Image (cartoon, grey):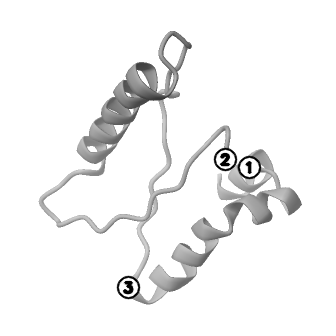
Amino acid sequence: MPEHMHLLVHLPTTVEVATVMKQVKGSSSHLITHKIAPGEWFKWQGSYGAFAVSKSEVPQKRLYIQNQEQHHQLVDFQQEWDKLE
């Protein structure tokens, strides 16, 4: 998606979400600005959303992520985000 991305990760209890997001944003920014689109401006937004899911919900969430392009043709990201607040 052009304005957001979903990640489904399993974190041990000793790893903080903020630490993972810092690494994801830093590594992906480096990749984008040095390999994918050098010379083009890129910056992640300052915030992110993180949600815990139960083990039983993982297949459903994985399917949602795999089909997000089709999903967002019906419901745009901002509408969906507003429902979560």
Q: In the displayed structure, would residue 46 be above or below residue 68?
A: above
Q: In the displayed structure, would residue 85 be above or below residue 23?
A: below
Q: In the displayed structure, would residue 48 be above or below residue 70?
A: above
Report the number of discs.
3
**62 and 56: which one is in front?**
62
Indicate the position of residue 48 as horizontal and vertical percent values: 48, 41
Indicate the position of residue 17 as horizontal and vertical percent values: 30, 50
Circle 2 residue: 1
Amino acid type shown at disc 3? Lys
Reading the chain from its start, which is encountered first: label 2 or label 3? 2
Indicate the position of residue 25 as horizontal and vertical percent values: 38, 35
Disc 2 residue crowd, few under 14, some 14–19, many 20+, Cα 10 Å: few
Circle 1 residue: 77
Name the outermost residue toward the right: 74
Indicate the position of residue 52 as horizontal and vertical percent values: 41, 68
Question: What residue is shown at x 60% (from left), y 69% (from top)?
Answer: 66
Q: In the displayed structure, would residue 49 be above or below residue 72?
A: above
Residue 26, picture quadrant: top left
Which structural element holds mark 2? loop
Q: CA distance from mark 2 to mark 3?
A: 25 Å
**68 and 13: which one is in front?**
68
Disc 3 residue crowd, few under 14, some 14–19, many 20+, Cα 10 Å: few
Amino acid type shown at disc 2? Met
- Is there a contact, CB below 8 Å, between mark 1 and mark 2? yes
Name the outermost residue toward the top: 39
Circle 3 residue: 55
